[in-house]
Image: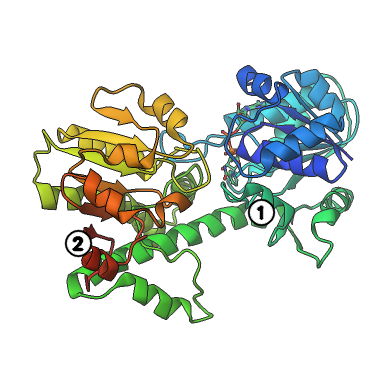
């Protein structure tokens, strides 16, 4: 099939590359000329395991192309994915300007039937707005060309995006148009060979499903973070509690890790957008409002622990930070807890040496060059002369570090373990002062 992906970010690029891998002819469009330049130079602008190989293979096979040329892109695809950003507006609601601009660019140029697919995470009712925007552009040209609008929210996880796209748990299609549904079934059939994973529903329910899924996952995290706060006070270990409750099939083990708070480009903005959308319908979402507030507090928990240990004036103190990305296997720093932790440590007068396996370029872009913050070439280098280590992102290389090196490199062996990577009892034996999250028995 001929596919166009409008927006070549985490979602658009993965979608385009994976669809090309299945034999489709894909054009990826972006307004960011630098991104397209990097892609056309044979590199990818993001860190995503397995993606570079797929991109290179499909570019070489002539099935994948990157462009800033809107005419070329609109002309190419019968299926037009819109995967542009939907950042929060000032009031937290989803800003649809990029989605609607993409829709207008299609309406203004299309010369044949298109299936326009909303892949961005968008509020309920957006498909109607997209349809209206396309129709308005067509009307300006006096055109009555047919088109369909479909909702196909994306559930990939950064860091495992290719795997998630290639082996989806489910493919949600919101459609009120049989022909468009057929196109989507055909497009996705290579991904659902084993058993049908496609769930077809009306457009509004599909749009809602994406928000509800992210809201549920964020709720689980904030719930466990609050349980961890209590566990610490009452002398229970949240890790044991997690295993205890996760074994209940009604609960399950996923997304029950207490930590330094959730971040990323999706949960914070989608929770905010859902709260805002509900507010405007006169339905205040009390649970989700609390989920967000609990997460904001959680992002500062590690600093609170540092202050409790070293005092509120951190001038003259120096800390090592391991992990900057909002989660492992990505260089995405959007809403990363590390940003909040870093800024707060610096505000309290400390200096920081940070290390992340892939996110340091992005961190430098977001934070700029700060005199009190240095970026290190290795995890070990970051430890040199620090008063304590703060583990913020659970990259694999931090899971089993050389604890002798940690002990000898730090001024005193103090570890703030923001992702509960280390066993408190082992730390005790090794003579390391360990501050985990919710490890009340330590
Ligand atoms: N990142 C994720 O893990 C993830 C997962 C599921 C859903 N989503 C949703 O998918 C959407 C995209 O997210 P993302 O992380 O890929 O964003 P991103 O910021 O990485 O990429 C968006 C891209 O769209 C481009 N763009 C904006 N307007 C454009 C236009 N008119 N024409 C062409 N390109 C345009 C931008 O330059 C940018 O490169 C969001 O709604 C997000 O919530 C993201």
Answer whether residue 367 is visible to the viewer in this image.
yes
Q: Is residue 191 left or right of residue 9?
A: right
Considering the numbered disc 2 on the image, is that residue within a helix, a strand or a loop?
Answer: loop
Q: Position of residue 40 (x, y in %)?
A: 72, 22
Is label 2's Cβ within 8 Å of ligand 1?
no
Residue 140 appears in the picture as rendered: no
Q: Point out residue 397 in the picture as x, y percentages from the top left corner.
A: 45, 50
Can you identify the residue that label 2 sits on? 431
Q: Position of residue 80 (x, y in %)?
A: 78, 36
Would you place residue 257 above or below residue 190 in this image? Answer: below
Rendered image quadrant of residue 374 = top left
Residue 147 is left or right of residue 366, and the answer is right
Mark 1 vs mark 2, foreground winner is: 2
The structure residue drawn at horizontal position 39% and vertical position 73%, both measured from the top left corner, is 242
Dot 1 crowding, Cα within 10 Å, few <14, some 14–19, many 20+: some
Of pointers 1 and 2, the one earlier in the residue sequence? 1
> What's the residue at 54%, 58% (across, down)?
212
Image quadrant in which the N terminus is located: top right
Residue at left 67%, top 48%?
162
Which residue lies at the image location 39% right of the left edge and 44% below the top edge? 323
The number of discs equals 2
Which color scheme does this rendered protein use?
Answer: rainbow
Could you tell me which secondary element the residue under label 1 belongs to? helix
Labels 1 and 2 touching (C-beta < 8 A): no
On residue 324, which mark appears? none
* Res. 164 mark: 1
Residue 120 percent across, percent down from the top left: 63, 41
For this view, does 68 lie left or right of residue 358? right
């Amino acid at each position: 099939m001929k596919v166009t992906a409008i927006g070549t970010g985490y979602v658009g690029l993965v979608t385009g590359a994976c669809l090309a891998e299945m034999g489709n002819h894909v054009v990826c469009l972006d307004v960011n000329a630098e991104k397209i330049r990097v892609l056309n130079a044979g590199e990818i602008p993001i860190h995503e395991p397995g993606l570079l190989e797929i991109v290179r293979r499909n570019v070489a096979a002539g099935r994948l192309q990157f462009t800033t040329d809107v005419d070329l892109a609109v002309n190419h695809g019968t299926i037009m994915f819109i995967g542009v950003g939907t950042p929060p507006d000032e009031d937290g609601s989803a800003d649809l300007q990029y989605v609607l601009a993409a829709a207008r660019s299609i309406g203004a140029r299309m010369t044949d039937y298109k299936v326009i697919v909303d892949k961005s995470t968008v509020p309920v009712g957006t498909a109607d707005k997209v349809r209206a925007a396309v129709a308005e552009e067509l009307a300006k040209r006096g055109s009555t060309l047919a088109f369909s609008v479909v909702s196909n929210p994306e559930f990939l996880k950064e860091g495992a995006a290719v795997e998630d796209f290639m082996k989806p748990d489910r493919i949600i299609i919101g459609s009120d148009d049989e022909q468009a549904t057929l196109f989507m079934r055909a497009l996705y059939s290579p991904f659902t060979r084993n058993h049908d994973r496609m769930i077809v529903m009306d457009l509004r329910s599909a749009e809602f499903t994406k928000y509800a899924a992210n809201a549920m996952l964020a709720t689980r995290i904030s719930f466990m973070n609050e349980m961890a706060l209590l566990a610490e006070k009452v002398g229970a270990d949240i890790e044991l509690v997690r295993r205890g409750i996760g074994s209940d099939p009604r609960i399950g083990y996923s997304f029950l890790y207490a930590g330094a708070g959730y971040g990323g480009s999706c949960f914070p903005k989608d929770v905010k957008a859902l709260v805002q959308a509900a507010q405007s319908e006169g339905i205040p979402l009390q649970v989700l409002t609390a989920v967000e507030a609990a997460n904001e507090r959680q992002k500062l928990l590690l600093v609170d622990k540092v202050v409790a240990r070293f005092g509120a004036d951190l001038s003259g103190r120096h800390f090592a930070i391991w992990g900057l990305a909002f989660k492992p296997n990505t260089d995405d720093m959007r809403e990363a807890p590390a940003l909040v932790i870093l800024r707060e440590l610096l505000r309290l007068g400390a200096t920081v040496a940070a290390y992340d396996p892939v996110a340091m370029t992005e961190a430098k872009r977001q934070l700029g060059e700060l005199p009190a913050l240095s970026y290190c070439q290795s995890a070990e280098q970051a430890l040199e002369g620090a008063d304590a280590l703060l583990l913020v992102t659970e990259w694999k290389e931090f899971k089993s570090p050389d604890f002798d090196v940690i002990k000898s490199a730090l001024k005193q062996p103090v570890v703030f373990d923001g992702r509960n990577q280390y066993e408190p009892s082992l730390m005790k034996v090794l003579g390391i002062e360990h501050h985990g999250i919710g490890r009340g028995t330590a």
